[in-house]
Every structure is written in structure tokens, then in C-alpha cells.
Image (tube, rainbow, N blue to C red):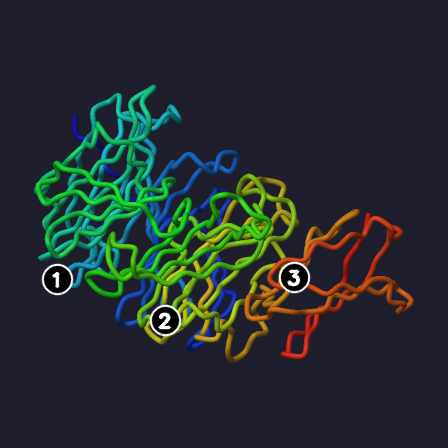
Amino acid sequence: MRSIYTIVIILAIPFYLSAQTTTFEYLLSSPKNERVIDIYESDNGEIYFSGFISDHWDYRIQRNALLGKIDEYGQFIDSIVVSYPEMCFAFTSIIPTEDSMFILDGTKNDTSGQFQNAGIVLTKFKSDLSFVEKKEYTFPPDYKVQLHFAYKSQSNRFLVAGAFNLTPDPTKTFVYQFNENLDSLRAKFFLDNNLFFGGLKELSNSKLWILPAIKFNYVIIDSTWSEVTEYDMPVFINSAYGFEWDTDTSFYLVGEYFPVPPAEDNKDIGIIRQFHPTDTSGFLFKSWGKIDTVDHPAVWGALDFKTKDSVYIGGATNLGPNYYGTWPSWYFVIQTDSMLNVRWERFYGGDAYYLMQKIITTNDGGCLIAGTRYDYQNTTEEELDIHILKLNNEGLFVGNQNDINIEIREAIIFPNPGTNNLKVRIAAQYPLSTFELYDINGKQVLTEQITGKWGDINTSFLKAGTYVYRIHNVEGLFETGKWVKQ
């Protein structure tokens, strides 16, 4: 039975926080949850974003798919919501085509919350968001499929791959290949390999390079899609959240880094530049900071570049177990050169609970951040909004900033308010800094030297009250603010 495909205009009201020629802050909000998965900038600067809408009490259930568009200044142009009766639906990847259109990869499943009765929904649309073609591919009803993503392939083709499982079997991978008319050219379900899918590229020899999401290796599938070979990573990057190829053979990869065996100087953000898909005899590697669960790379894409001399890495810090933290969190953005040396890191937030979904490099050399914002201080519902930042190539806003609500910092502290301990997070370009704390009378009560990215400060001996902090060094770092001990 063919599904009914309904399109309605979104009822959400966008708030125009700023409209600059190169930088802006944009918020899309309604009484529902809006979550962004992918973001894409066209050659003329127009920005498309995809995702889904869910009920405010459950951010995970993808009730209706969402496609939106803003202009190069951050001004809202249009958006649509697409729904299937009695089904959950989300748009994931946005793929440009050779005929100046776009392909949307979508995933649907039933409303049981078990991701069953799933299918791929492919839609071709024009720049005005009008749909010109749609095709569906349905999985067997007992296959549980959560999300899948589309990737450009060779010769005007594209690949859709994702993860599925058959209870109680472990998660496995599937791959489809489509042409621009949305026709399936071939498909494969890898039932004999536990390849929890993380990323995909078709190599020039028609082999597939797969990045598993939670294993320390790469996978090569031969050109017949039958033989699977696994190769170890040069270092252990677990939960790889972003990768980008700069040639047919070399790529950059970012994720959570765990040395084996564990050591006191464990790191949390690691990046590899590898010069061959599987040969690890040639690679570069850098990592930053002691491991801490409050740092997390961007969920759907934590790395991007247009020129490899300006690599952007993004994520969020001071996070909790879900999207609804009732304390401030911050995006972080790191820019490195081609040798993985940090140029700058900055933090964006402080007024709400933020989680970065994806970061991409823009045509002008800056970057776009797509995330979710939970305004816990001004809402009685657990309700998420789509939040987009456009930054210049130094990670800054330019022009009139009167309407920009988000803070930019190079050092932050949390929790705030706190009790017997506080954490200081320093931008990666500052190897040494000083933390000072003063009481309301201006008396210095604490000073601490911080080496590297993290500082843990013991405040158990301090009385409850309001304090003023300063974080500084001789290289130009200077941040100040208030900290409350409860």
C-alpha cells in the first residue's frame, strides 16, 4: 500500500537575531521540538537545513520531517513539514545534484518507538523547496532501522548507508546505491558482519571505505560488495563523529580519543590526518585535553574544510545525559592548519543549553554551526529549537552585534552555581594560564596555574556566596565573570 505523503507549511516562527553580510545568529522556534540533522550552503550563499519535529515531551521520536531555507544573511525564506499518517519521519542528508537540484535522504518507521517497519524515502527538490520526485524503499518489517545517511558517489550516483538490527542480533550495516533519478542500482545487507555504521566513501576503484561508529578500525568492501576486510586505526579514535577526504586517498578524522592502555593524560578530542585509506604508516595525529564526559563532538558531523589549511572541528561542552540540561552549555569550535596545529578555539553559549549537531565550512572561509537550543530559563516545557550560527574565519561575529544574544569566550567555568569544585575550560591555543578568584570585597581568595585545556579547582574551603573570577595569561587571554557557590 502506498503511503500518503502530506506537505504543510511549518507553523514555527523564526526569530531574526541578526542579519549581517557575513555572520549571524538564527533561531527557529515553535511549541514543538525542532531538531536539525544536516545543513548545506549553496554556491549563492543560500542555506538549507533538514531534520524533524517531535513532541515536546520526547525529543527522540521523529514525528514529522522538516526542511528549511534561510538566505546568506540569516533571514528566513521558507520551510515545510512532511508527514506520514501513523508513521515517524525525518529528513537526514542533503545532496546537491548535477542538474542544480537537491536530493533528500529520509527515514521512516512506525510509531512504536522500536524503529520497525522502516524504509528509505528519497525526494528530489528544487531551490524553491518544491518537490519534483519521490521514491520509497521498504525494509523487511522486523528490521529495526534508526537513521541512515546519503553520500556522493561516482558518476552522478550516491550511496545511502546506515545501521539496522534483528533482535537479539548486534547492529549491522546496509548500503544502497542510487542514481540521480532515485532508482536503486544495487543494495547489500551485511548480515555476517557487525559493522555499526559511522561513515562511508566510494573509492576510485569502486571499493567502499566504511568507518564503523564504535570500533577502532576501518573497513574496506570490495567492488562486488561481497568481501569485507578490516584494518586497524593508527590510534584509537572511538565514536568517530566527523571525517572529510581531501584527495582520493587521504582524509581527516575526528572523534573521541582513548589511549590504550589508559593513562593519566587521557585525551578527549583527537584528530587524524591519514594519507592512505588503510595504510597507517603515514599519518598525523593531535589531541587536546584530559578526558571528560562534558566534552562531545558534534553529533552528525564534527569536522569540515574547503581548503585543508583551515580545518574546523566542532562540538559542545558542559553537557549532561540528554538534550534538556537545566544549566548553560557551550559550543566549541577549533580551527587548525593542514598540519593539525591549532590556530584558535572559541566557546559560544552561556545563556541556554546548546548541543552542536553539525559544523560546515562556508564559501567565504568561515563556518556554519547547526545545533539545538533549550531555553530552560524561559520555558515550562522541555522544548528544543533549531539554532544556527554563521561565523567568520576567526570564529567571530562582525558588524553590528546588538542583536546577538550568544556569548563568545576563550575560557569558561562550570558548574555555575557550584559547590566544592569547579572546572575551568581553556581554549586550546593557550598552553598556560592563571585562574584567580575574588570575594565581593575584592580580596583574592584563590589562585591556580592551569596547564593545558582543563583545570580542576577545589573550592570546598570557601563560604557560600558570589565571587568574581579572572582567567588570563601573557599571550592575550583575559576572561572575567561571576561565580556563585551554593
Q: Nearer the viewer, residue 242 or 289?
A: 289
SS at badge 1: loop
Q: Nearer the viewer, residue 343 or 323?
A: 343
State whether residue 366 is above or below residue 82.
Answer: below
CA gap, disc 1 to disc 2?
Answer: 33 Å
Q: Earlier in the sequence, mark 1 or mark 3?
A: 1
SS at badge 2: loop
Q: Position of residue 155 (x, y in %)?
A: 9, 57
Q: Earlier in the sequence, mark 1 or mark 2?
A: 1
Number of the front mark, 1 or 2? 2
Q: Position of residue 379 (x, y in %)?
A: 62, 45
CA gap, disc 1 to disc 3?
Answer: 46 Å
Provide the residue designation for mark 3. Answer: 412
Q: Check disc 2: other Cα within 10 Å, few if <14, some if 14-19, many if 20+.
A: some
SS at badge 3: strand
Q: Nearer the viewer, residue 83 or 460?
A: 460
- Count of numbered circles in the view: 3
Residue 338's mark? 2
Amino acid at dot 1: Asp
Q: Residue at x 21, y 40 (%)?
A: 229
State whether residue 10 is above or below residue 306.
Answer: above
Q: Are marks 3 and 2 in contact (CB under 8 Å)?
A: no
Residue 466's mark? none
Q: Is residue 421 left or right of residue 44?
A: right
Amino acid at dot 2: Ser
Q: Check disc 1: other Cα within 10 Å, few if <14, some if 14-19, many if 20+.
A: few
Q: Check disc 3: other Cα within 10 Å, few if <14, some if 14-19, many if 20+.
A: many
Provide the residue designation for mark 1. Answer: 99
Q: Is residue 257 left or right of residue 162?
A: right
Q: Residue at x 36, y 56 (%)?
A: 253
